[in-house]
Image (spheres, grey):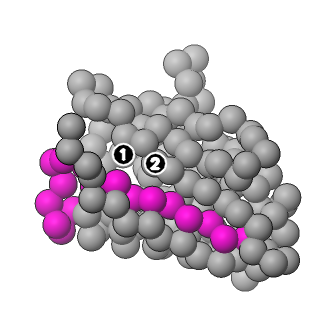
């Protein structure tokens, strides 16, 4: 198996760690800032389901933890699971949020750049929400 090209995108947010993590770890809050994930996200008997431009996907979220891990896993029917590593760490009186974008095998350069832009927009939206701007 080959390595995936990876790009880590991060943002500094002037908000206390506990409040920021409490908000960001809840799947219910994702649609307020993570528009790049899906057009909708809802809980069903089967777990969390996202409506995406590529169709319906199941999304599994890392449980609340003491390490700032906010990873999630996206599963489209008949395709390999996509791991989305997302971390929140203390940065002085605020937090640093980092998402590592892993290029999927079928992605063109344009698709990878588009996803990186969506991640940047999502991180900026999270910053605005958490900073109350």
Q: Is residue 68 left or right of residue 56?
A: right
Residue at the image position 74 percent from the left and 40 percent from the top: 64
Q: Is residue 66 visible?
A: yes
At numbered mark 1, what does the secondary structure look like: helix, strand or loop? Answer: strand
**Residue 1: mark:** none
Where is residue 23 drawn, in percent x and y?
75, 55
- Residue labelled with disc 1: 52
At numbered mark 2, what does the secondary structure look like: helix, strand or loop? Answer: strand
Q: Is residue 67 left or right of residue 82?
A: right
Q: Residue furthest bottom?
A: 133
Task: Identify whether 53 is placed above or below 100.
Answer: above
- Is 101 magenta? The answer is yes
Residue at the image position 56 percent from the left and 65 percent from the top: 98
- Is 3 magenta? The answer is no
| Camera-nearest label, 1 or 2 | 2
Q: Which quarter of the image is occupied by the C terminus?
A: bottom right
Where is residue 39 drawn, in percent x and y?
44, 51
Q: Is residue 22 left or right of residue 76?
A: right
Residue in the foreground of this view, choosing between 33 and 89: 89
| Quadrant of res 89 | bottom right
Query: Distance from label 1 to label 2 (Cα)?
Result: 15 Å
Residue in the foreground of this view, choosing between 99 and 42: 99
Residue at the image position 21 percent from the left and 37 percent from the top: 1
Magenta part of the protein: which range? 95-111
Task: Identify whether 27 is placed above or below 32.
Answer: above
Q: Is residue 57 visible?
A: no
Task: Identify whether 85 is placed above or below 91.
Answer: above
Confirm or deny contact between disc 1 and disc 2 (CB under 8 A): no
- Residue labelled with disc 2: 84
């Amino acid at each position: 198996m080959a390595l995936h090209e990876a790009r880590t995108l991060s943002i500094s947010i002037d908000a206390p760690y506990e409040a920021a993590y409490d908000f960001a770890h809840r799947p219910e809050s994702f649609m307020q800032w993570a528009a790049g994930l899906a057009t909708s996200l809802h809980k069903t008997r089967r777990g969390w389901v996202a409506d995406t431009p590529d169709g319906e996907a199941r999304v599994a979220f890392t449980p609340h933890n003491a390490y700032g891990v906010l990873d999630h896993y996206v599963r489209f029917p008949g395709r390999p699971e996509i791991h989305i590593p997302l971390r929140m760490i203390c940065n002085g009186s605020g937090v640093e949020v980092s998402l590592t974008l892993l290029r999927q095998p079928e992605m063109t350069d344009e698709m990878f750049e588009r996803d990186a832009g969506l991640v940047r927009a999502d991180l900026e939206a999270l910053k605005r929400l958490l900073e109350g701007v």
